Image (spheres, coloured by chain):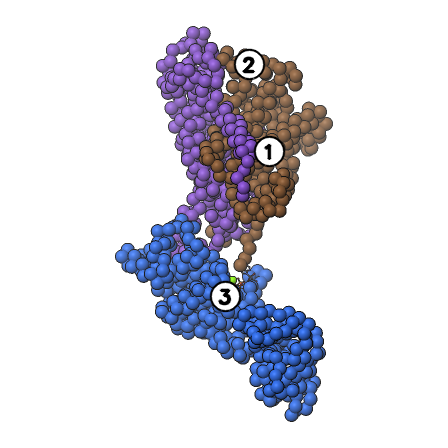
Amino acid sequence: MNPRPWWRRAGHAGLLLVATVYCVFPIYFMFVQSLKTAQEDVFGNPFIVTNPTLENFEELFERKGQPRNFVGRALRRDYPFFVWLENTIVIFGGSVAITLAAGVAAAYALGRLQPPGFRWWRRAIFATYVVPHTILFVPLYQVIIRLGLDDNPVVLLLVYPTMALPFCVWILSAYFQNLPREIEESALVEGASRAAAFYRIVLPMSRPVLIAAGIFALGTIASDFMIASVFLLSEHNQTIPAGLATMEVALDELLAVAGINLMAIPVVLLCAVFARGYVRGLTAAMIEGA
Amino acid sequence: MATAYLLLAPATVLLLGMLAYPLGWEVWISFTDFSPLNDHGPRFVGLENYRHLLADAEFWRAVVVTVGFAAATTLAKLALGVAFALLLARPFRGRTLVFLAIFLPWAYPASVSVIGWYWTLSPPIPTAYSPFMGTLKYTVDGALGGGAWAFLSVTLFNIWRGSSFIGVFLLAGINAVPPELFECALLESRSAWRRFWLVTVPLLRPFLALAVFLSLTTAFADLANVWLLTAGRVVFPVVGTQAYWLAIKGGQFGPASALSLMLVPFLLAVLALLFRAFDPPAEARA
Amino acid sequence: MAQVLLKDLNKKYDEVHAVKDVNLHIRDKEFIVLVGPSGCGKSTTLRMVAGLEEITAGEIAIGDRVVNDLPPKDRDIAMVFQNYALYPHMTVYDNMAFGLKMRKFPKAEIQKRVQDAAEILGIQDLLKRKPRQLSGGQRQRVAVGRAIVRHPQVFLFDEPLSNLDAKLRVQMRVELKRLHDRLETTAIYVTHDQVEAMTLGDRVVVMKDGWIQQVGEPLELYTKPSNRFVAGFIGSPAMNFVDVGIQGSDSSLTAQGTGIRLAIPPVNASQLGPYKGQRVTLGIRPEDLHIAAGGDQAGYVFDAVVDVVEPLGSEILLDVKAGPNSLVARVEPTVRLKVHDGVRLAVNPDRLHFFDMTSEKAI
Ligand SMILES: Nc1ncnc2c1ncn2[C@@H]1O[C@H](COP(=O)(O)OP(=O)(O)O)[C@@H](O)[C@H]1O
Ligand SMILES: [Mg+2]
């Protein structure tokens, strides 16, 4: 193809810039605020930080910042941020693991073993997305009390996977369905049992799709704060999103923004590390096993 | 086949366990006058709740707003997502960075970014940007009615995050299409616009369909988030928040259940249409 | 090394009866080729031997063991698939070593066997690569290498060359043949390509619609096809078929078709006697037709019009019309003829084939 004229390239670059700014600016903005002192927050330029400080982050873990002048010390609450962080890691990690385990099993059954009616089964699983969640937690609460899991973080390990499972089952089963049967059959002929063929061949070669499903699960789970806020009432059981939602923003705005960033950074890093794998996995799910 | 059912069990049990009873309860309650405020248990009232709703102007306003919101955000997300995907489709210097930037809004946990957005757009305390945001809010609310600004901020947030997801998703879709097909299209039509509609869109159909559906469902989830955040200050009624309001604040579980179920047939119909586009094709036997 | 016995083998899917009463005795060290049009049940038969497909009825024995209920891993076979089925996440070395590892061979032995196989196939330099870094031909070699490292009793090939381009296919065909001569392992080879079948097979099995049509050495299939299907399937360009009526007295029978009238050679006369007054199918291979010269007997020539001329260099294929019948003749490259030219053709009277109209069996 001919080299593209300069104005086409400039246009492309311009669009890239616009897209980047559009995507990154809100996050940049939140990040900048979290580095500010109270002083600068009120009087400084909102777009930049001149005296970056980590005190907001430090304060999350142990309150040692000076009380602000216009707020009485008595009004300020302590936040068990460290506990929230722990809960979040356990619940997110656990939910992603459960989603993947249940999702891979179901997807393998649907995409490869194809029991009678597998198409409808898969559609039914996907169709659970239409269930309206708005007031679903009222009856869900009854289920949870019946299970004796009231105000117990384990609840989320059961609820979160249901949010990511349908999509994960969908892409994983599309992948398994497209995967040439012969690869597995070859392993069988070579001396593997069905289980060994799955474990030693199918699973490792599906890595990109597993990453895609895992990242999707993480992104979905990390987007919830409603279920977490509704079901986890006591402070020491909450996850970061649920906890942040209980903060008194008027008093602890900077603290909250720091908390947002602290929660986001590991998730974003994980996503960034696996971003390429995520795209590759989604692609692989739609064409034959790449 | 026994193995197949065994493998399907965990996912199915999880989904049924968490959804079947609650959904069944909701359907049942929608035919009753159940309310924790009553001293009697749920009484069967037949289609009364539904009949009531259909005659209620407020309900229809909510439907219009909800469908409008879902349609508008989905269209915007699709347009932006397609643009992102096309921008990233060809290699160029710095592509990885731009790709990560576009991935960011989705990767950034929405549970906290929605809080951040809301506080940024409606700052609770005097910060440096509060006066500006305050004026904006005042102007918008003044022009469109109270709560308009909050609603707008949810809308923008939903588009911002969704376009990121769809962009990356469609990029994966473009990668799934053999490049020869695009090259073929290049020979057949010189107009980029025609090429886009005649080749790119049909090739990406399954991805687009899946994206549309996920966009619709997340649109409703986001609305619920904001309702909680603003403690009901979203004045534009949408079906989800109205139901929430009826149930939690009004204790009227019957009408609330009926209301929240109203969208299910609509979504199912959309889904049935979309399944035709994105169902994995039957495996060809050699 | 072993013989393979298929006894009354049947395979039924829900709607399709894919393999019907197949009986076959594959001898030790034999290279046998299953050939037939797509969908005729070749792969299904092969996959039943491999244990990848359940047997609906019948019996399969490898060596002297009935293997019906053995899983693939216990049948001591190796298989090469059309799409190669290499493990994409493993290097070439690991691909080839996988079967040996699963069978718990000692490391040194694995190393040695993989090296040997790689040497035979000329892929020593590729051992560290992943399959996606290989060309189609290289992948094919790795797939074969994976099969030979285990020294199995039987090789199974399912269209292993079909994904290669024409040139590479010819080359690999020769190599496979050489490999078999060297290893002397019993091999069952499936293909839809009759040239591959003829060149590779010690014996060839022609299948159609799940039935075995004929089993025989390549030349036997060519010269004595047992029915019209085999006659048409084997040989390229395909045999010409003309509907004719058998007429005349016992001493001088003729085959009368529209636009063609040929005397029936004495070799065929006795079998065709009972068909007097009936219609049969006459089969003439293209190379058994030539431009009539003085030496040809009057009874064995007919007139035709040239329809298409296909010069191939070493020969010319003439598509001609004799009345409504289209025939292909393979003639000398020196023949100069143009479209619409009239031409007098003669048949080789020793090589005519006749088929019953209803049973399609050779007469
Ligand atoms: N798993 C299957 N389920 C249903 N029908 C099948 C299956 N595998 C093959 N068939 C059918 O069985 C017949 C024989 O197939 P196959 O043995 O693959 O033919 P080929 O000779 O081309 O290798 C075909 O009609 C095919 O459609
Ligand atoms: Mg086949």
Q: Mark 2 touching mark 1, by CB under 8 A? A: no
The quadrant of the picture showing ligand 1 is bottom right
Within 8 Å: ligand 2 and the Cβ of disc 3? Answer: no
Mark 1 closeness class: few <14, some 14–19, many ≥20 residues within 10 Å: some
Secondary structure under tag 1 reads helix
Inspect the image, locate mark 1, and give the three-letter code of the amino acid beneath it: Ala
Q: Which mark is residue C226?
A: none
Mark 3 closeness class: few <14, some 14–19, many ≥20 residues within 10 Å: many
Colour given to chain B in the rendered image: brown
The residue to which callout 2 is attached is: B132
Q: Position of residue A23 (x, y in %)?
A: 51, 28
Q: In which quarter of the view is residue C209 placed? A: bottom right
Inspect the image, locate mark 2, and give the three-letter code of the amino acid beneath it: Phe
**Image quadrant occupied by the N terminus of chain C:** bottom left
- Callout 2: chain: B
Inspect the image, locate mark 3, and give the three-letter code of the amino acid beneath it: Thr
Towards the viewer: C345 or B258: C345
Residue at the (63%, 26%) spot, across then down: B238
Colour given to chain C in the rendered image: blue
The residue to which callout 1 is attached is: B79
Q: Is residue C166 above or below residue B267?
A: below
Colour given to chain A in the rendered image: purple
Question: Is residue B245 visible in the rendered structure shown here?
Answer: yes
Residue at the (47%, 71%) spot, across then down: C199
Residues at discs 1 and 3 both on one chain: no
Q: CA distance from mark 2 to mark 1?
A: 29 Å
Towards the viewer: C51 or B184: B184
The residue to which callout 3 is attached is: C191
- Left or right: where does residue C272 sit relative to residue A187? right
Towards the viewer: A230 or B88: B88
Secondary structure under tag 2 reads helix
